[in-house]
Amino acid sequence: MSRHINIPVFIPHEGCPNDCIFCNQRKISGHVHAPGETEIRRIIEEHLATAKPEDYCEIAFFGGSFTGLPEIQQEKYLKTAHEYVAAGRVEGIRLSTRPDYINEGILNLLKEYSVKVIELGIQSLDEEVLKRSLRNYPPGVAVKACQMIKEYGFLLGVQTMIGLPGDTLKKSIDTAQRLIGLKPDMVRIYPTLVIKDTALEKEYMKKRYTPLSLDEAVLWCSILVQMYENAGVKVLRIGLQDTDELREKEVIAGPVHPAFGALVYSKIFLERIKDRLENMDLKNKSLIIHAAPSDVSLVTGQNKSNIKYLKEKYRFRDVKVIGDQKSRNYLDLEFRD
Ligand code: SF4
């Protein structure tokens, strides 16, 4: 089976003179120095050596604000990556950047070097949230950047954050609604964590910022994920890259969990089941939930949390999940006396 492989080239904080309240890019990417050409080639070759011929490989410049780099440096990186595209060894290039580093000149350059996907760090489209997060541009700039990227024919990825200073569930829903209207192809949703050595850490220490609880973050994400998926926007990631180092040493506070995405999808399954059980008298019946084998653990929930909840709330005699369905996401409920 063909896999989608991103060959990650981290460019930590390079090209970014900003200091967003939540960001310590060097800590997050785990790298301090930007890689040189030799190192980039080594990273690419290492990944290609383990890829199968049928895999879909992309070189992914992540970590900082790529298009904020001096043009000459962008071109250097792009030329190296483009060689691999031209040789047919990788399919394309993707990169992440800020909305205020998008303009016609930049998009022309990226087109020339066969960049396919541009991921924009949108975080929020709420004016107050952007201001308090020290993003230094108004929401309109992000909207315009999304529109231009689509007009140029790139695939558009949007990265959003929940629980930033001043954020509310309503504001996060409004942001998702407006983004969906801009037709992104993919989205990443990150709950805000308080990372060491950031301005947000200072706010947190002075008790001027309270992060979302784990339950709140799971609830908010479950709502947003459904909005995006219903609109056909692919959800690439929920929560940060799960690295022990980041979780244990760098996160001061916030809704961090090793299986955050699984918690969100379990919550979505639970809500779907609850919707179907509304207004039914189910006391002392048995419930059998039919799902795809790969969804059984999500439907069951961590430590059987969904099973326990359903049993208690609806007073079922028994609740079982059976993995006998072919399609992922499929749910069928059967009741027995
Ligand atoms: S623009 Fe991106 S890299 Fe720069 S400080 Fe903000 S989040 Fe970090």
Image (spheres, rainbow, N blue to C red):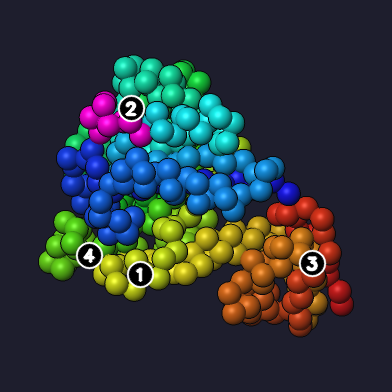
Question: Residue placed at 43% from the left, 59% from the top?
Answer: 241
Q: Position of residue 226 (x, y in %)?
A: 57, 48
Q: Secondary structure at mark 2?
A: helix
Cα separation, mark 4 vs mark 3, equals: 42 Å
Cα separation, mark 2 vs mark 1, equals: 32 Å
Residue type at tag 1: Glu
Cα separation, mark 3 vs mark 1, equals: 35 Å
Residue 196: which numbered mark, if any? 4
Question: Residue placed at 33% from the left, 31% from the top?
Answer: 76
Residue type at tag 2: Glu
Q: Secondary structure at mark 3?
A: loop
Q: Which residue is mark 2?
A: 75
Q: Secondary structure at mark 1?
A: helix
Residue range of the region highlighted in magenta in the rendering: 68-77
Q: Report the front residue among 67 and 274.
A: 67
Residue type at tag 3: Gly
Question: Residue placed at 30% from the left, 56% from the top?
Answer: 31
Between disc 2 and disc 3, the foreground one is: 2
Q: Is residue 69 magenta?
A: yes
Q: Which residue is mark 3?
A: 323
Between disc 4 and disc 3, the foreground one is: 4
Cα separation, mark 4 vs mark 2, equals: 33 Å
Q: Which residue is mark 1?
A: 245
Q: Position of residue 131 (x, y in %)?
A: 20, 41
